[in-house]
Image: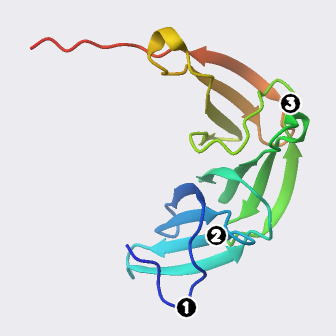
Amino acid sequence: MPISFGLPRLSWPCGLTFDVKRGRLLLSSLGGEGFLYAYDVDAESWSVVASMKNVDTTGLVWSKYEDCLYALSVDHGDRSKNSLVKLTANGVLTETVKLGDELPNLGHHPRCQLIPVNDKIVLLAPGEPVEDRHDRPATHSYVIDSETGSIEYSTKLEPQISLVAG
């Protein structure tokens, strides 16, 4: 799907979600000031929803419960600056909520995934590679209160090897 002529060049995609209410795929980027792009499924066309105004994020999710977007904003070296960013469906930043210090340093990890569950956001984040597991890191799961940023539950999800009998 080529990006339409006349739109800002796509660089450093960092979040992808689907807005069911509006029937569009949303893609956030880091390149330049960053942009929130939309692909309208019915019209089969791309547009720019909004500038990200230099707010660097990873992960992007549309919340049906609140009809808004959430993304994770992380500091490359200081985990005390991790935050959950809330945007309107039109990409306007409405709130930044500091996250609990229990989160590890995530950097701009492309494999972080946010999942909305009512008024909570679940963060799935890969851990460090484990040598005896062929560099397949465990995934950590965090349940975050979207209003306060507190980590209400966390657990480590170990990789499972599955053998298929032939």
Residue 134 drawn above or below residue 53 = above
Residue at (80% x, 64% y) in the render:
93
- Depth check, front residue: 158 or 91: 158
Q: In the image, what residue type sits under mark 2? A: Leu
Residue 66 visible in the picture: no
Task: Give the structural element (helix, strand or loop) at label 2.
Answer: strand
Residue that mark 3 sits on: 100
Residue that mark 1 sits on: 6
In the displayed structure image, the side of residue 55 where residue 13 appears, left or right: left
Residue that mark 2 sits on: 36
Residue 164 drawn above or below residue 4 = above
Q: In the image, what residue type sits under mark 1? A: Gly
Instruction: Give the Cα distance between marks 2 and 1.
Output: 15 Å
Instruction: Give the Cα distance between marks 3 and 1.
Output: 41 Å
Q: Quadrant of the C terminus?
A: top left
Residue 86 % position (x, y): 77, 55
Q: Return the disc, 2 or 1, that comes first in the chain's sequence.
A: 1
Q: In the image, what residue type sits under mark 3? A: Gly
